[in-house]
Image: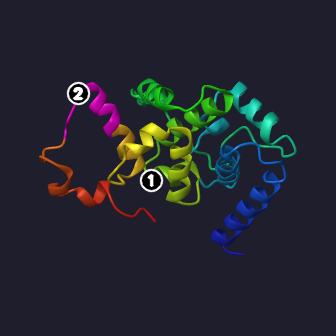
């Protein structure tokens, strides 16, 4: 069996086992996808999925109690949060725009921030299966923030652009995105 097929089989198996719990909220679907990908070693999320250990145990207990999740990243991924100077700013941005202030929202925010340390598209770094899943997750949890992405900017770039704008920093040399030579790097398909 090829490595790709083996990973897909693992992913499908873990996902189907995680989905045995009753649907609790729309986030449950996305958390199940991210967790299954993480268990199959197909995301950059580090140990505890980027959550604090107590958050991870609560996530496991509340949503995936019938499945024994590993604590450490099966991919061996290690993300150095010390190099992420903007971590607190990202958390604050997402908290400011979040539709709720509950345990589930704190899990979602922590996982998104961890995914921002990856070097691929955010949906891939999180272990989601498509950009549309990430778009749905962001529109559900952060509706006013997601609505600001009127030009369909790639989500990780969009979040960092929001941070820059909050600080009054505009690092782009072009007078507008439409005339920028890097337009295709910020906008367009990610699949």
Q: Which residues are magenta?
A: 161-171
Quadrant showing the N terminus: bottom right
Label 1, label 2: how far apart the Cα atoms are: 25 Å
- Left or right of 66? Residue 143 is left
Q: Magenta stretch mostly in which secondary structure?
A: helix
From what the image shows, is residue 126 above or below residue 190?
A: above
From what the image shows, is residue 59 above or below residue 153?
A: above
Which element carries disc 2, helix, strand or loop? loop
**Badge 1, how many Cα within 10 Å: few under 14, some, many 20+?**
some
Q: In the image, what residue occupies the spot 65% across and 69% down? A: 3
Q: In the image, what residue occupies the spot 68% across and 66% down? A: 8
Instruction: Find disc 2 in the rendering and name its residue.
Output: 168
Spot occupied by residue 93 in the image (x, y as percentages of width and height): 43, 29
Is residue 167 one of those drawn in magenta?
yes
Q: Quadrant of residue 11?
A: bottom right
Spot occupied by residue 69 in the image (x, y as percentages of width and height): 78, 43
Instruction: Give me the disc on residue 177.
Output: none
- Left or right of 125? Residue 160 is left
Seen from the viewer's position, the closer of residues 125 and 149 is 149
Front tag of 1 and 2: 2
- Left or right of 148? Residue 81 is right
| Residue found at the far right of this picture | 66
| Residue found at the far bottom of this picture | 1
Spot occupied by residue 20 in the image (x, y as percentages of width and height): 84, 53
**Badge 2, how many Cα within 10 Å: few under 14, some, many 20+?**
few
Instruction: Find disc 1 in the rendering and name its residue.
Output: 121
Seen from the viewer's position, the closer of residues 62 and 36 is 62
**Disc 1 + disc 2, Cβ < 8 Å:** no
Q: In the image, what residue occupies the spot 70% across and 53% down? A: 36
Question: Which comes sooner in the sequence, label 1 or label 2?
Answer: 1
- Left or right of 103? Residue 94 is left
């Amino acid at each position: 069996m090829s490595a790709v097929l083996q990973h897909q089989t693992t992913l499908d198996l873990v996902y189907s086992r995680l989905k045995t719990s009753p649907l609790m909220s729309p986030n449950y679907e996305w958390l199940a996808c991210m967790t299954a990908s993480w268990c199959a070693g197909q995301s950059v999320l580090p140990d505890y999925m980027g959550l604090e250990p107590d958050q991870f145990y609560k996530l496991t207990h509340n949503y995936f109690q019938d499945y024994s999740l590993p604590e450490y990243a099966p991919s061996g991924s290690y993300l150095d949060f010390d190099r992420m100077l903007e971590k607190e700013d990202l958390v604050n941005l997402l908290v400011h725009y979040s539709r709720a202030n509950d345990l589930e929202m704190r899990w979602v925010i922590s996982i998104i921030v961890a995914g921002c340390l990856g070097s691929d598209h955010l949906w891939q770094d999180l272990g989601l299966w498509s950009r549309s899943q990430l778009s749905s997750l962001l529109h559900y949890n952060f509706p006013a923030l997601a609505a600001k992405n009127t030009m369909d900017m790639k989500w990780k770039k969009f979040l960092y652009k929001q941070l820059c704008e909050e600080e009054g920093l505009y690092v782009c040399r072009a007078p507008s995105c439409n005339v920028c030579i890097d337009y295709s790097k910020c906008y367009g398909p990610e699949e």
